[in-house]
């Protein structure tokens, strides 16, 4: 899981000699500790080879390899198809994907999963291959990072070192991500599927070009809060069948669905009804299964609301009997999952279908109770998720962003809800939040909890993690930093978030990395010290602005904020006048520090009158207002008590 599994080359050679195998490699094995110079002093004897039947993604992977090697070492390797290689060819090649130099059929599918890949050497040749084309593309990016020094930092800046030599010794590496499905949702990763691919993740909501390896929908058809769409796709309109929709305050409304309509008291399909919510969901999923024949997971999720809950007599009776709002939902999802799998078994060749639903807002609390030992147990067999049902745990309003989910200081309801779901099923997905939605610019002190959370998720056996952070506005420095950290750790959970943050700023800022890290350490250290003394009182929820919470001025010393703003502003001013910087680097670094300065300034503004007298507030606000406008961020503060109502 997420580790580089390296075996000594001499052991591999012995296995080749004794067993006559080399994991699909064709040709002679390299001698121990052989150094292969891919590029040396502006020259190369190597070519990049792809299979003649390779798809678009493998071709693109070869082009990426060619492009970044040329940009780093000023040498352009030719790309050839393997049909150009004669039997026993003695050239030097970097083989990308399934070629005559490497037979991918010999790879261990169970071990590699969907996105795992191998990096190997065979004689002079370097071999990069995964179980599918996207995995091979990820293998190319891994090679570029490890052996060329490339770092994909943001969607508009990739660190490419100038090198005179690229070489590799004997390789027998297998890389497998800790999580099968990985996505970090920001404006940048969502709008740019190529950047997501370079970070070895996928975009969340949109389809991705096949040359980038496809997107989330290749594995998981997750269109979010979708139950109303599913009914519509099945032809069940609100006007024709209001009984399939939620009853709210005694009136049927097109805001969510009725979770008991079409489900009998024993949890089976009510065949006496020609049209029902249950039948419509089943038909909607069947249609999607046929549209996407390779997808394994399909979402059925409530609409995005805390309060639009069906309160018809049957839904209320189920919730009262089983103890939570999620009970009616799980009974419905179980029914749909059984019916769809039965259909797939009989009419679609036994294709496995998994249904994913959300534990979110009104369904966060699982249908469990505690026994005399304090252990969570299901309230009834009907609310235990079926083997092909997955629950995506998404604690939006309850979770405390300042602490990891397994931290004793985490919000008790969130900890208990997660424990309850874990008692019901091992099929958990995670949808987590990494920003203060009430104010995207506010500093979230979560760099240490990132590591705790990711390792905890891995140790629980969770296979899918989606993180949402700062998706509404572009270029927010915190979102871009966290995208780098999270995507690295989703692949290898044992990485250290602070080390990754240091690497990020060192590569992004060059000579100005010290100022960026000084800013980061100042904010982190101050708030972590506050967390140690405040404990659970230090509360930062994803969607709330709470007096006495982490946004309170007492938890955010103004001297720290002033110092942080000064560091960022001074760095921006120095970089703007630095003759040693190339123009593009100057613009990037100045813009970054200007963006970073907004965080402490907004935090000061929102509590200004608690820090100072009101005399200077208007001048402070005007200047901040203009800078926010330059980043198109003004709406971030709209509707909250720190908006510029007097000045806009």
Image: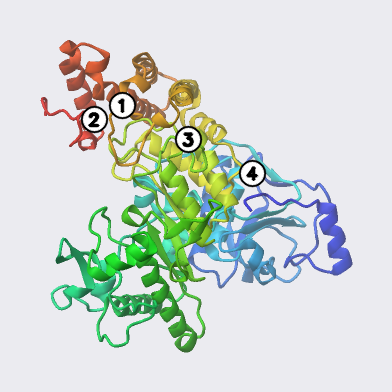
Which mark is first along the chain, 2 or 4? 4
Task: Look at the picture and state if 32 lies above or below 269.
Answer: above
Q: Disc 1 and disc 4: Cα gap in Å? A: 37 Å
Which mark is first along the chain, 4 or 3? 4
Which mark is first along the chain, 1 or 2? 1
Point 60% across, 68% down: residue: 51
Q: Which residue is mark 4?
A: 147
Q: Disc 1 and disc 3: Cα gap in Å? A: 29 Å
- Can you name the residue that lies furthest to the front here? 372
Packing grade of label 1 (10 A; few <14, some 14-19, many >=20) is many
Q: Which residue is mark 1?
A: 598
Label disc, if present, on residue 451 of the rendered structure: none
Mark in the foreground, 4 or 2: 2
Q: Position of residue 467 (x, y in %)?
A: 42, 48
- Which element type, helix, strand or loop, lies under badge 3? loop
- Which element type, helix, strand or loop, lies under badge 2? helix
Left or right: residue 633 compared with residue 62: left
Which mark is first along the chain, 3 or 1? 3
Point 38% across, 33% down: residue: 539
Q: Is residue 79 visible?
A: yes
Q: Nearer the viewer, residue 486 or 271?
A: 271
Point 56% across, 42% down: residue: 74
Q: Which residue is mark 3?
A: 409
Are circles 1 and 4 on residues that touch, CB within 8 Å? no
Mark in the foreground, 3 or 2: 3
Q: Nearer the viewer, residue 606 or 407?
A: 407
Label disc, if present, on residue 628 of the rendered structure: 2
Are circles 3 and 2 on residues that touch, CB within 8 Å? no
């Amino acid at each position: 899981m997420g580790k580089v599994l390296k075996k000594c080359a001499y052991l591999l050679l012995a296995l080749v000699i004794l067993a006559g195998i080399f994991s699909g490699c064709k040709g002679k094995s390299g001698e121990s500790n052989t150094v292969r110079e891919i590029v040396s002093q502006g020259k190369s004897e190597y070519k990049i080879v792809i299979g003649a039947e390779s798809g678009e993604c493998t071709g693109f992977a070869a082009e990426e390899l060619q492009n970044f090697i040329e940009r780093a070492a000023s040498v352009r390797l030719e790309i050839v198809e393997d049909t150009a290689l004669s039997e026993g060819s003695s050239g030097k090649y970097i083989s990308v994907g399934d070629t005559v130099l490497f037979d991918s059929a010999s790879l261990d599918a169970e071990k590699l999963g969907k996105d795992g890949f191998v990096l190997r050497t065979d004689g002079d040749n370097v071999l990069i291959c995964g179980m599918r084309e996207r995995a091979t593309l990820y293998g190319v990016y891994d090679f570029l990072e490890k052996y060329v020094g490339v770092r994909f930092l943001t969607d508009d800046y990739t660190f490419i070192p100038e090198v005179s030599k690229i070489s590799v010794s004997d390789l027998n590496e297998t890389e497998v991500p800790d999580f099968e499905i990985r996505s970090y949702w920001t404006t940048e990763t969502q709008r740019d599927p190529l950047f997501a691919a370079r970070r070895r993740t996928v975009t969340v909501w949109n389809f991705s070009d096949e040359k980038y390896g496809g997107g989330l929908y290749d594995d998981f058809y997750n269109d979010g809060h979708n139950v109303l769409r599913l009914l519509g796709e099945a032809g069940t309109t609100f006007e024709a069948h209001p009984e399939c929709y939620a009853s709210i305050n005694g009136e049927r409304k097109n805001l969510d669905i009725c979770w008991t309509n079409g489900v009998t008291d024993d949890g089976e399909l009510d065949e006496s009804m020609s049209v029902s919510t249950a039948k419509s969901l089943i038909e909607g999923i069947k249609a999607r299964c046929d549209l996407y024949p390779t997808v394994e997971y399909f979402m059925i999720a409530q609409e995005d609301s805390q309060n639009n809950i069906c309160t018809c007599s049957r839904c209320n009776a189920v919730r009262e009997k089983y103890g939570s709002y999620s009970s009616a939902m799980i009974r419905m999802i179980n029914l749909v999952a059984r019916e769809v799998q039965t259909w797939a078994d009989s009419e679609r060749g036994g294709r496995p279908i998994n249904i994913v639903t959300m534990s979110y807002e009104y369904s966060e609390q699982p249908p469990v109770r505690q026994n005399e030992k304090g252990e969570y147990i299901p309230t009834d067999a009907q609310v235990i998720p079926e083997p092909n049902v997955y629950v995506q745990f998404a604690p939006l309003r309850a979770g405390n962003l300042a602490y990891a989910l397994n931290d004793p200081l985490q919000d008790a309801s969130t900890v208990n809800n997660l424990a309850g779901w874990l008692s019901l099923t091992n099929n958990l997905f995670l949808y987590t939040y990494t920003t203060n939605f009430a104010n995207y610019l506010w500093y979230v002190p979560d760099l240490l909890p990132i590591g705790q959370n990711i390792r905890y998720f891995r140790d629980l056996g969770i296979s899918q993690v989606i993180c949402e952070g700062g998706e509404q506005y572009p270029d927010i420095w915190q979102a871009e930093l966290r995208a780098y950290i999270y995507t690295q750790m989703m692949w290898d959970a044992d990485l250290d978030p602070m080390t990754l943050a240091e690497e990020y700023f060192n590569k992004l800022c060059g000579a100005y990395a010290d100022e960026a890290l000084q800013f980061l350490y100042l904010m982190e250290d101050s708030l972590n010290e506050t967390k140690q003394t405040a404990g659970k009182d230090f509360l930062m929820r994803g969607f709330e602005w709470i007096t006495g919470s982490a946004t309170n001025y007492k938890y955010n010393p103004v001297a720290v904020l002033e110092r942080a703003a000064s560091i960022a502003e001074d760095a921006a001013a120095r970089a703007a006048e630095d003759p040693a910087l190339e123009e593009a680097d100057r613009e990037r670094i100045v813009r970054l520090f200007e963006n970073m300065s907004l965080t402490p300034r907004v935090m000061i503004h929102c509590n200004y009158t608690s820090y100072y007298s009101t005399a200077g507030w208007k001048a402070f606000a005007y200047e901040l207002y203009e800078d926010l406008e330059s980043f198109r961020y003004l709406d971030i503060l709209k509707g909250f008590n720190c908006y510029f109502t007097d000045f806009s």
